Amino acid sequence: MHKIVQRVRFFNRSSLLTHSHFDQSQLVSAFSNSVTMDQTRTVQFLHFREITNTRELRNAFDKYDKNVLSRCLNWTSRENDNHHAASYVVNHHFTADHNDRCRKEFSSKLLKNIPDFVKIVEVGARDGLQNEKVIVPTDVKTKLIKLLVSSGLSVVEATSFVSPKWVPQLADAKDVLAAIRDVEGASFPVLTPNLKGFEAAVAAGAKEVAVFPAASESFSKANLNCGIEDNLARCRDIASASRSLSIPVRGYISCVVGCPLEGKISPAKVAYVAKSLYEMGISEISLGDTIGVGTPGTVIPMLEAVLDVVPVDKLAVHFHDTYGQALSNILISLQMGISTVDSSVSGLGGCPYAKGATGNVATEDVVYMLNGLGVKTNVDLGKLMLAGDFICKHLGRASGSKAATALNKVTNNASKL
Amino acid sequence: MSSLEEPLGFDKLPSMNTMDRVQRFSSGCCRPQVDNLGMGNCFIEGRSCSTSNSCSEDNEGYTAETYPWKRQTRDMSRRDSFSQKTTIKGRNSMKFGIVDNSFYTSDYQYSQKPSNKDMQDMAYKVMKGMPEFVKIVEVGPRDGLQNEKNMVSTDVKIELIHRLASTGLSVIEATSFVSPKWVPQLADAKDVMKAVHNLGGIRLPVLTPNLKGFEAAIAAGAREVAVFASASESFSKSNINCSIEESLARYRAVTSAAKALSIPVRGYVSCVVGCPVEGSVSPSKVAYVAKELYDMGCFEISLGDTIGVGTPGTVVPMLLAVMAVVPTEKLAVHFHDTYGQSLSNILVSLQMGISAVDSSVAGLGGCPYAKGASGNVATEDVVYMLNGLGVKTNVDIEKLMSAGDFIGKHLGRPSGSKTAIALSRVTADSSKI
């Protein structure tokens, strides 16, 4: 049954080649004809086509159903001359040296929509540290932020002007901002839950703020003590106040996939909140999977709903790695054109809804994947690891980043990677 | 501009022909009800269907799952943004197993922006190659335990295999008949095999490095074996003490002996992306080894990222190279989570049509090349993702977690699976997830 489904997909796929770079009708007719040709002629025909245009054939491997190719290349009989075609392509065009070239040359539909540059928004100093049990002194926070900036990160969330009653770990918000006032090369957004917090932030020297409504009514009430609409009203106040001061405002939406109280969250709700934020002039909307339950199956419908109402360049994704799903969710978001990702150095920040479970995705792991994809980030992984080492030493625990752990412990032999 | 809360009225619809309208607004629209998904829709497909020489053959294979697929394709080719949207909602709901009625009454703003088409093209493209069923090959008792520092007693191994068998896993790699000099953790291979070889309904492959190991495996009751070549010459020499060609020659002996006894042989290729000695490994090398294993009679080739350095940027070219010489349905992927990359690598492999994934319960098995780093990807995490994607696995995640708990207790360490940790520590409030 699987073969039949594949064949259907192939022939349906042939009508979808609107983005192809080669002469679609030629190739389609070549392959449809080859189904009826006898095998020797098929191989000769393909062989000829290979020599004249191997890129076409490679694209054919990429875009067409392998069942058709197996008929053309006669995998089952395993005779040498029939394999010549495949080995020609295999030996001459598949190299692993340059990921950038690989990504573009193979024009694999899976990777070609991925943006060339991804901005990483580092939330370790805020979202990470606010969830740590141990309170970190101001100078350690400041040093962490400086190390993060030196690794190339251009956006480092510095602190939060939420009442210290709720978040004691960030009670030193004013001092942190004062300490990093002269640090150049990055912007330092701070969280502001309401106008009062906003005014305190501006007085302390903040040049960028962030607001955080939720897509779930129950979560909003439980976490922020007000419903979604009230929260959006507060956001509007902050947005208009900041407009007059030319201060950009970032918006976070939490529980975009699942809520610890309500369960599944409808994408339409998320789209509604995103649209409201967009209309009030928020410069970037970060979609947060607060409890980390998302998988591509739920992330894609949610992104589709939001992309309907907010342009893709205004969106960011903020996945939690509580169920280990963050990197695959990030990959799928990149495939859908998202080009901003939130992450936390060393995976700082646990999950308040599942004690002991992890929270934020680790920046090192994200950068590792982006490097492998040939996506520019301007972040130096080695320097990032230094920042991670620093804070983990201080917190007295191991890094939450697998890439950092592996790179630190890799033996001499493996240094060629 | 109508708000998101207002349902779209009929008068606001773009013009559609009668057939479309009937399709769109019939009660079964966008829902996976088999009675509505009749063969009649094949005619609606139009040209895209009739270019197939075997349309009638294709109809026989239709099920509720394949049908919405075709509807999706038709709508895409007609470039009707409204129908695309409803179909995609419907299709996503079906494909991803989220049959959630709130989507259909949801208050979308149906805009006619051309960019939406591209965006939905993207969503379609990234998910369309995904298989409907993925076979999980559980390698915990072998690949997992062989890399554990702590030795595990034979009884515990047998109990682990029994527990894994009850989760719905159909293939569990039981042990390895490699010399105990090299892998002391699996020196009790014979005893384990004798105890479990009669477990009904599941396959229990065992590793056999050569003819001698093969004969010992058969004597102990094995009914399926596995061989393991490397795509990197240096790794082959340092890991199994012989060159790639020599190892392939040994395996030819194993596969011909196996063929005589009708014993299936699985082939592993290691270092498919990177090698601890050589660095990057060329995809054409991997394709060569995979093809050799396939030609000698292996029914499945598992491509292993032994040191976990792969990312979709290196995995995709490697898979393209191998898929050019070995049919996709004969391939499996075996990613290590040493750099946290395995789930995204698995996802991209699924997008390319791979439908067999190797994993290890509780992420058993460290990395011998980066001491203290993790190794195998955790089966619980993989099943969680597949469940979320609506891909069938037949694996019960709770029973899997209890098998993971069991072995974790014996090894005296917490699970290597984030899903297992999260699900076992989630508070009462979060029970609705």
Image (cartoon, coloured by chain):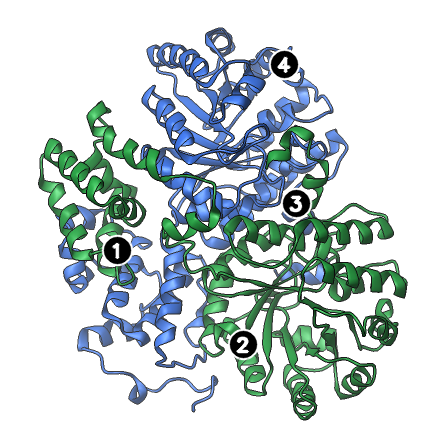
Which quadrant of the view contains residue A42? Answer: top left
Residue B265 location (% of width, % of height): 41, 20
Give amino acid for label 4: Trp
Q: Secondary structure at mark 1?
A: helix
Q: Secondary structure at mark 3?
A: helix
The residue at 89%/63% (across/down) is: A139
The verdict on a common chain for dots 3 and 4 is no
Q: Colour of chain A?
A: green
Q: Earlier in the sequence, mark 3 or mark 1?
A: 1
| Dot 1 amino acid type | Arg
Q: Are marks 3 and 1 on the same chain?
A: yes
Mark 2 touches mark 3? (CB < 8 Å) = no
Q: Is residue B77 above or below residue B129?
A: below
Instruction: Name which residue lies at 84% across and 63% down.
Output: A141
Residues under labels 2 and 4: Cα distance?
57 Å
The verdict on a common chain for dots 1 and 4 is no
Local crowd size for mark 4, using a 10 Å CA cut-off: few (<14), some (14–19), many (≥20):
few
SS state under label 2? helix
Query: What's the chain of the residue with tag 4?
Result: B
A66 to A136, vertically: above or below:
above
Label 3 Cα crowd, 10 Å radius (few <14 / some 14-19 / many 20+): many
Query: Which label number is shown at residue A13?
Result: 1
B399 or B235: nearer the viewer: B235
Q: Which residue is mark 2?
A: A269
Q: Amino acid at mark 3?
A: Ala
Q: Amino acid at mark 2?
A: Lys
Q: Report the disc number at residue A403.
A: 3
